[in-house]
Amino acid sequence: MEIFLQQIINGLVQGSVYALVALGYTMVYGILGLINFAHGEVVMMGAMVSLSALSLMAGLPPLVSLPLSLLLAVAFCMLLGYGIERIAYRPLRHAPRLAPLITAIGVSIVLQNLAMLIWGRDYHSFPQLFANHAHRMAGAIINDIQLAIVVAAFLMMAGLMLVVHRTRLGRAMRAVAENQHAAQLMGVDVNRVVSVTFMMGSALAAVAGVMVSANYGLAHYYMGFLLGLKAFTAAVLGGIGNLRGAMLGGLLLGLIESLGAGYIGDITGGFMGSQYQDVFAFLVLIAVLIFRPSGLLGERLAERA
Amino acid sequence: MKLLELSGIGKRFGGLNALTDVSLHIGRGEIYGLIGPNGAGKTTLFNVITGLYQPDSGEFNFNGKRYRAAKPHVLAGAGIARTFQNIRLFANLTALENVMIGRHVRTRSGVMGSIMNSRAMRLEEKACRDKAGELLNLVGLKKPHQTLAKNLSYGEQRRLEIARALAMEPLLLALDEPAAGMNATETENLKELIEGIRNAGITVLLIEHDVKLIMGLCDRVAVLDYGRKIAEGVPDEVRNDPQVISAYLGVDGE
Amino acid sequence: MPNAHEAGIFKRQRRRILLAAILLVLPFAVDGILGRGWLRIVDFAMLYIMLALGLNIVVGYAGLLDLGYIAFFAVGAYCYALSASPHLALAFPQLFPDGVHLSFLIVLPAAALLAGGMGVLLGAPTLKLRGDYLAIVTLGFGEIIRIFMNNLNAPVNLTNGPQGISRIDPISIAGLSLNATQRIFGITLPSVHLYFYLFLCFAGLVVFVSQRLEKSRIGRAWMAIREDEIAASAMGINTRNLKLLAFAMGAASGGISGTLFAGFQGFVSPESFSLMESVMVLCMVVLGGMGHIYGVILGGLLLALLPELLRHSVLPMQQALFGKTIIDPESLRMLLFGIALILVMLYRPAGLWPSRVRRRELSSDERPDETA
Ligand SMILES: Nc1ncnc2c1ncn2[C@@H]1O[C@H](COP(=O)(O)OP(=O)(O)OP(=O)(O)O)[C@@H](O)[C@H]1O
Ligand SMILES: [Mg+2]
């Protein structure tokens, strides 16, 4: 029972991170109908930049350096997201679908290898800034960082929902997602909306990157790949293009993964162990695509013919 | 003799009823017109009978077979060919290749035959190429048949789409606004082409906004408005139907 | 007119003979001028070309983005590694005391079938959906295959984990081992030469099949799907089945290349099948010219030789300039690939060597508006 509760907690923490990253995929997909393959690398960049900033500000008190480095990472990633869209996607908005997919792969490779050139192949450890207290809850343990991750993730998601549903900008975003052409006719500046969407998604990604590296105490040039893949799976699970779906999908995937990894040994009679954890996301993805391609919350929309 | 019969077709998009309880039938050898204001649901009806959309209710009967939710390639094989309102040619392929692709359902060569370059395959390929060339001449494409589809003029692209559809040897040819963007002479040629097609025994279903063309060509006309069939009959009847007049000159002045 | 036609055929015939002659003496020329190490590199380049041609069927003809293509290469390679090495003696000592040593000619078709079958299993749920899903699913699949290769060494040692499987039997055909120098018709042929010719045969086969299919009803249907899937389905093309066919054929061809690879190298490990390899093969297709066989061959050749050129130029240059290695050639290479993918898609979407039709379209260069 304790193990079960512990896996639930771990799953929720991991799931909150997936949810934040999945939101980035889903927002871009909702607006442009495009899978932003490079999104995982933006997460990685956020983690790396914040780490570098932290080590530069090593002398400052953590209460100053942590928010500052987070802010820096967010700003950097927003610029990055803006740049990616301008360079790799916007010129191809009316090109055949294969084209932006390929440039997206290109961007993702460039970012990964740039990171490797700048930060090297080694794992970078995230400095311990605060005493990370562990709290006991009915036998399971949750520490300060994990608590902070869950709380921050939920706050950010709530904030995003407010922006999308309560502001002019949000209305413009929803209009463009509904029908780009019509929105343009109504005087919405589509390019601006798209840029802002990328920047918002990237800001969430930066925060997620910092969360992951704080949680595991590590960052690495390759960390974005698998994280991106899983977050995408989360978005599909929830129904790609649907914000609530991305959050639900993220949390669910986190839970599935951690429960799966916790019990796979028992299920397979010891044949497979937790090193197969990464396989679950993929199985979930395939299962969703077979049984409910529109995802849990997605509605089935016929492609316009 | 009915070729196509729709009964109670309905299609919704979210909260929008694009088609509501549409029933109609088209006889063999007819030219049947489908008109209505913008957004009336004409193209949606085409998409339903060609399998691109699944109807939410109702079913249709084509050439003696019942269909509800059939795949597009099945309906194409059964003998429904169409053109698209927003031209959908294979833009980076040549005009000839476009028409040859139209022959897909009426040809058989498979992987093995193609790799072995068997005699049957070569004969079929030659017949396919010849037929495609003939059809291009029939629709009056003057440019070289090797021209890429995307480098043709608007009118030529529309005619290429018709040739591609004819290559399928359909029983029913469904044309979605074929005259859109054509000038007067082109439209006149189109009219002759459609009459020729009908004389060759192919039933034609025609969406058009050009009232003169519809009135001059069609044996019968149906009018859609907000997804409902509001009138049907011979052109003169329909033209004078008060409901039709108000739909066209209606409240929002379409 | 008939004369001009005949002359055309004659010219093509002559060009073919010339090409064949060049390819036949190529290993001797490379060996003599550049050395045996380079011939080995050329052999590997041939394998890459084969891979690129296989992927070209999927991406170039049918327009499906497969980002885990190397997984099928891995399936082929491990297929041969397991069924032609002592390795399985570790896992099943009673059953196979000496391991398994099947003939290459048996494993090859089996590996092609297995890889093709996996392609179908993977493609069936995804191919009816939008193309982007296929990209992600194949990406994940590539990663999963690698996780399994890395971890299936316990509790039963199937793959030997990250260490990989070694002592794989060399390919031998009709009792003729390709790992030894052989004398055929009085000509002495060292092992690398023999492998070159073997790979040449298979690459030739893939080219032949691709060319025949490209100009057939099947090839046209693929291109229709690539151009406009909805219009293709309205033309009566069973898009799902044809996409599946392209995907399976590409996978099978990857499986064949993998088998050859395992026999040639005598050793396989998960490291050879990373995502970056998939990306590299994709780059070959995209850079060379999607859908154009010669372009793809050129792309394969360039990119397979590029790392060697970089190794021989970038390292010494950095040493000379800075006295140390600042940028390692591996990541420089990947960086260049990434940039090249973006630039090609933006400015030259038909690749370095587009097909004649594509070339014409580029030169005519009047873009009718696409906002219909
Ligand atoms: N895939 C779709 N998703 C959502 N709404 C759709 C879709 N296809 C059509 N509609 C809507 O259904 C209604 C009917 O559209 P349809 O294209 O059938 O009209 P139409 O009669 O062909 O008009 P037009 O003369 O402008 O071509 C319109 O309001 C349209 O916006
Ligand atoms: Mg319409």
Image (cartoon, rainbow, N blue to C red):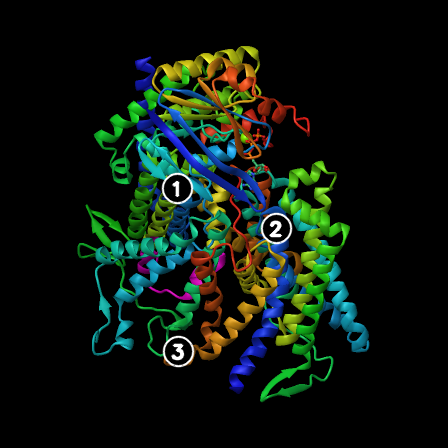
Camera-nearest label, 2 or 1: 1
Judge whether B191 appears above or below C324 on screen: above
- State ligand 2's quadrant: top right
Left or right: where A196 falls relative to A59: left
Q: Which residue is mark 2?
A: A30
Q: Residue at x 45, y 38 (%)?
A: B8
Left or right: where A283 falls relative to B227: left
Judge whether B249 appears above or below A46 on screen: above
Q: Position of residue B22 (x, y in %)?
A: 48, 34
Amino acid type of the residue that numbered disc 2 sits on in the rendered structure: Gly
The question of residue C298 being in magenta is answered with no
The question of residue C265 being in magenta is answered with yes
What is the count of numbered marks? 3
Marks 3 and 2, the one that precedes in the sequence = 2
Residue range in magenta is C257-277
Judge whether A126 appears above or below C104 on screen: below
Callout 1: chain: B
Nearest to the observer: residue A199 or residue C304: A199
Nearest to the observer: residue C186 or residue C238: C238
Callout 3: chain: A
Mark 3 beta carbon near ligand 1 (under 8 Å): no
Q: Which residue is mark 3?
A: A267
Circle 2 — which element?
helix
Nearest to the observer: residue C42 or residue A168: A168
Label annotation for residue B68: 1
Graded by Cα atoms within 10 Å as few (under 14), some (14 to 19) or many (20 or more), the crowding at tag 2 reads many
**Res C324 visible:** no
Amino acid type of the residue that numbered disc 3 sits on in the rendered structure: Ile
Q: Residue at x 55, y 70 (%)?
A: A254
**How far apart are the two marked residues, 2 and 1, measured between alpha carbons?**
31 Å
Q: Quadrant of residue C235?
A: top left
